[in-house]
Image: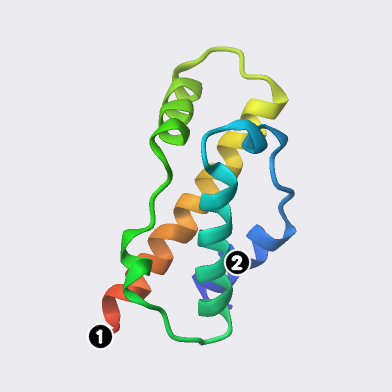
Amino acid sequence: MTRFAELYKRYVATKFPSLGKSVGHFPLYDSIVAGYASRLAVGSPLDEGALELDSDPETRDTVASLRIKNGLTSEEREFLDYYSLLQEMRRAIEAEAEKREF
């Protein structure tokens, strides 16, 4: 199994974090990454947008604040873990997109 296939399998098995519903445009970011990931998982072509995936400023600020916070709640830990998984997938998608010509 490829590294990307393993990441995608982990993503599909991971529950969306409840905190993610109230942070910036996190649900949209999740949806966009998932869309590119599912396309890549079945061998569909990627477009140039795959090179520009990024979360919104509020999400990035929330993540930065949580990373320095002591005593995270279970919801906050779940959110950070999920965000980290999305970031791993984003990097894998971008790496694959860089190999392709548009």
Residue ID for mark 2: 8
User: Does residue 38 lie above or below 62 as drawn?
Assistant: below
The residue pinned by badge 1 equals: 101
- Graded by Cα atoms within 10 Å as few (under 14), some (14 to 19) or many (20 or more), the crowding at tag 1 reads few
Q: Which quadrant of the view contains residue 13?
A: bottom right
Residue 6 place in picture, x, y as percent: 59, 68
Q: Position of residue 64 (x, y in %)?
A: 42, 26
From the top left corner, tell me how far across and down residue 62 is, in percent. Answer: 48, 27
Quick one: SS at disc 1? loop
Give the amino acid at mark 1. Glu
Q: Nearer the viewer, residue 22 or 99?
A: 22
* Left or right, 98 with reference to 6: left
Which of these two is toward me, 102 or 85?
Answer: 102
Quarter of the N terminus within the rendering: bottom right
Q: Residues within 10 Å of mark 2 (few under 14, many from 20)?
A: many
Q: Percent x, y for residue 58?
A: 44, 31
Q: Disc 2 residue type?
A: Tyr
